[in-house]
Image: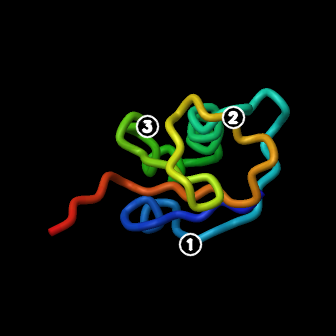
Amino acid sequence: MKVVYFAWVRERVGKAEEIVEPPAEVSTVGDLIGWLAGRGESYAHAFEAPNVIRAAIDHAHAPPQTVIAGAREIALFPPMTGG
C-alpha cells in the first residue's frame, strides 16, 4: 500500500510517500502507525505521539481503529487548523 506523509510528519520521516508491505498482524490505522514507528529513528520521531496523528484511507478520514485491509493509499498527517 502507498503511505503518504504530510507537514511535519513528512519532514521527520524524510520522504513524502512510500510503498510499504506491513506484516499481517498490522490490521488497523493505529497498528500501522505503531509499526511505522518501529522502522527507525526518523519514524520513531515522527510518530512519538501517535494519538495526535490523523489518517485518511483513500481520501476519507479514518480513526485509529479503522481496518486498513484493501486500502490503496493511507495519508498520515498532524492535526490541522483552518481559518
- Where residue 40 appears, as percent x and y from the top left, is 60, 48
Residue neighbourhood size for the residue with mark 2, other residues' Cα within 10 Å, grouped as few (<14), some (14–19), many (≥20): some
Q: Quadrant of residue 51?
A: top left
Q: Name the N-terminal-most of marks 3 and 1.
A: 1
Identified at 36% across, 54% down, the residue is 78
User: For mark 3, what is the residue?
Assistant: 50
User: For mark 2, what is the residue?
Assistant: 67
Residue neighbourhood size for the residue with mark 1, other residues' Cα within 10 Å, grouped as few (<14), some (14–19), many (≥20): some
User: What whole-number distance in Å separates the C-alpha atoms at marks 3 and 1?
Assistant: 18 Å
User: What whole-number distance in Å separates the C-alpha atoms at marks 2 and 1?
Assistant: 23 Å
Q: How many marks?
A: 3
User: What whole-number distance in Å separates the C-alpha atoms at marks 2 and 3?
Assistant: 16 Å
Which residue occupies the foreground of this view, 71 or 37? 71
Q: Quadrant of residue 7?
A: bottom left
Identified at 76% across, 59% down, the residue is 72
Which residue occupies the foreground of this view, 63 or 31? 63
6 left or right, relative to 58 = left
Identified at 79% across, 27% down, the residue is 25
- Where residue 17 appears, as percent x and y from the top left, is 63, 69
User: For mark 1, what is the residue?
Assistant: 16
Q: Name the N-terminal-most of marks 2 and 3.
A: 3
Q: Secondary structure at mark 3?
A: helix
Mark carried by residue 31: none
- Disc 2 vs disc 1: which is toward the camera? 2
**Quadrant that contains the N terminus:** bottom right
Residue neighbourhood size for the residue with mark 3, other residues' Cα within 10 Å, grouped as few (<14), some (14–19), many (≥20): some
Q: Residue furthest left?
A: 83
Q: Secondary structure at mark 1?
A: loop
